[in-house]
Image (cartoon, grey):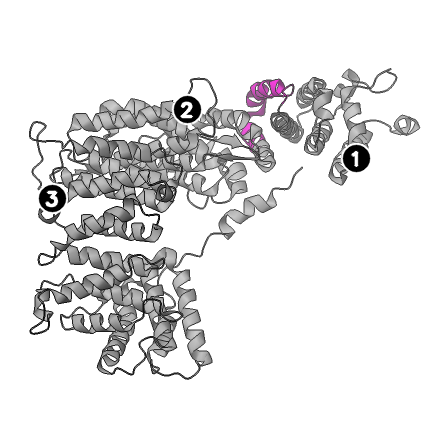
Amino acid sequence: MTSIVDDTTVDDETQPREHAYFEKADEFLEHLKTLIGVDLFSDEEATEEERNAIRRVQMICGEYHEQSYLWDPWLEQIVAPPIEALRQHAARVVESADKDPATVRANWLAEATYQIVNTRGSKIIVSFFPHQVSDLSVAIAYMQRLEPSGSRGAWAIRYIVLLWLSLICRLPFDLSNFDPEGGESGSTADTIEAIGLQYLDKAGLERDAAALLLARLYARQDTHTRFKNFLDQSEPHLVESPNLFRALGAMQVFTEILKSGGLDQLALHLPQILELAQKLPHNTSLSVHTVIRKYVIKVSGRVGLKLLPHTPTNRITVRTLHGETISPNEGFASSTESEAEIPDEIEGIIDDMLNGLRDRDTTIRWSAAKYIARIGSSVPNDLTSQLLDAILDIYQTHFVEGGELNTAAEPSWHGATLACAEFARQGLISGNNVPKTVNWVLKALFFDVKKGTHSIGSNVRDAACYFLWSLPRTLDPNAMRPYATRLAQSLITLALFDREVHIRRAASAAFQENVGRMGLFPHGIEVLKWIDFYGVGVRRNSFVVSAPEVARHEVYRGHLLNYLVDTTLKHWDPDMRSIGAEALKELCKADIYTLAPPVVERLKGSLAFVDSHEIHGAILGLREIAEGLREEQDGERSTKFRAQIFELLDRLTDSSIKGYKNDLLLEATSQLIGSSLSDIALNARPDLDVKSPPKWRFILDLCLKHRSDVVQDAGSRAVGMLSELRSSERDIDQ
């Protein structure tokens, strides 16, 4: 039998270690102190201590990247010292014209600060930056001293200082106060804008910070009039130019200003922003890039949200774990259906979102799903229902009742399922829409389409789990009640028998959420202890330990058996077929003489199929059931049942046995022969004193002559079991 040790033990070992708190805080702060305590203007070669400090800072940041929230109690101690050191360094550079603004040690300190920003996020870290008004002139002068190309590593200094400038630009003071006496009015704003534009077409992180700086500048009350000129200058870069980085910079500015700018400042510019975003896909040299299409979705979605009323027309409700219903919109005056006016531009924006749900790239589908749900929460209820119908129509594009889905369905099904999940999370799925939505998502829950030597669809199944995790958080239990058992059976099956560990865990989380908030799933609390995060983390444990325990409950047993027979034993991965057969035996052992006969009858039909995967899975399943019968040790009843399984070998065709790459099939068949052999079977299918040998003897001869050592070994073991039932003298004579 094919070994499954590797596939069943790596699931948890490859997971990053989880931390309970910032265990390395003292070490991290000590390394930062080393980088801060040196002379940033020194040209001497870096010491081994300094090199080790920057290396350890990078390693610790990477170690806590997935749990960066653990840093929060230490953030001020982490961020304030290096930023203050860089501020003092900038001030000294500005005061002295002969100081090098980008020495190696200054670069290292800036890179350490970038690692901190990258780990915890710029939005949180920037709030700890110094933000006195007096810092503006220092930051501007320092940026002017830095060369745009810079020396190696200077990108980190430019990135940090640009972030610092973007924070200072948020302070409520008039920039004209910093204009030189007797100089032109607005020169300070001109300088800041020039610095931002200078880095807006760069390929590195400076572009991100420059876009944020310009967005903050154009959102100010005293400089917002400059945004119109920026829009006009950006149009040729978006519509005609092939310059990817300049187009990205402009779109980043649009997304940031639409996020932070006020409606009174942007109202006149929204049509032009939307027009530029909708023209960009027609620029074929740019539209092929995923990041460009993503920003088109983000800009269109944010324009749509700005155009719609800011008072939600749908009152979102959230159910707590105690069954209470609360509304995040409490205190907002909701617009009535008649008061809500939908701008004409919204229709085009919705079309963009629906097209985005079908995009070939996951990041675009995800962005489109989020924005179409947010738009749905801001329009009247009847339009929200129409939006949901349009999303559900996407499923039908590649779906034929009773037919198989093709690989082209994967992007559209994933996008539609993500959108449904976002609608559920926003509380936009009414009781009337639950039946059709749940029916489609249940189909998506088992989306698995073979493509070449592998299959696709894990992202669709993951999105379906997200939907079923979101639904109980907002839906009334009475609307869920008719589907509770069906949903529970489906989630249990996926949590136990999916090939991918992240899908098993996602289904487990969805099941747990439903049990906690709804309390409708049969035997929910009792089942949860077998399908928790760790219980389904290792494949073998999930299949052969947790599944039999869950199958003790009759409501789940039939569904689990059906999935093993219809799906797992026909899987493209031989390891899945092997462990699925083991799980089948463990489930049937609860009442083998009742559960096994219908399973054997269904597997019998698969032996004559052309698909070698299905034949192999059926043989493995029959072999494990025969092994289960041998373990019963109840004499004649077990022997007769195994003899019936032994007779099924005659259904195998010569073409399948002799086919190309038949080693797995012959190995499993010889194991089946060894497990089902008995005196009754041999008497019914004798191989001696007959003119033509029976099928089982023919198979053993093939195994013993096969080129594979594994197949020969399996055949020899079967012959050994044969010799235990009768004398082998006549076999040797032959």
How many marks overall? 3
Instruction: Give 511 or 24, whichever is nearer the viewer.
Output: 24
Residue extending farthest to the right is 733
Could you tell me how far apart the alpha carbons at marks 2 and 3 are, in whole angstroms? 42 Å
Instruction: Give the magenta part as a residue range.
Output: 583-610
Which tag, 2 or 3, sits closer to the chain's start?
3
Q: Select label 2 or label 1 by which is in front.
A: 2
x 57%, y 29%: residue:
569
- Tag 3: residue type? Leu
- Is residue 655 visible in the rendered structure shown here? yes
In the visual, does 467 lie left or right of 456?
A: left
Which tag, 1 or 3, sits closer to the chain's start?
3
Q: Quadrant of the N terminus?
A: top right
x 16%, y 35%: residue:
378
Residue 586 at x, y percent in the picture: 56, 32
Could you tell me how far apart the alpha carbons at marks 1 and 3 are, in whole angstroms? 83 Å
The residue identified by callout 2 is 398
> Which dot marks residue 268?
3
Residue 691 at x, y percent in the picture: 87, 15
Asked if the residue under mark 1 is in contact with the one under mark 2, i.e. CB atoms within 8 Å, the reply is no
Quarter residue 717 falls in: top right
In the visual, does 349 lie left or right of 462?
A: left
Which tag, 2 or 1, sits closer to the chain's start?
2
> Which dot marks residue 305?
none
Instruction: Give 522 or 408, whichever is nearer the viewer.
Output: 408
The residue identified by callout 1 is 716
Could you tell me how far apart the alpha carbons at marks 2 and 1 are, in whole angstroms? 49 Å
Under circle 2, the secondary element is helix
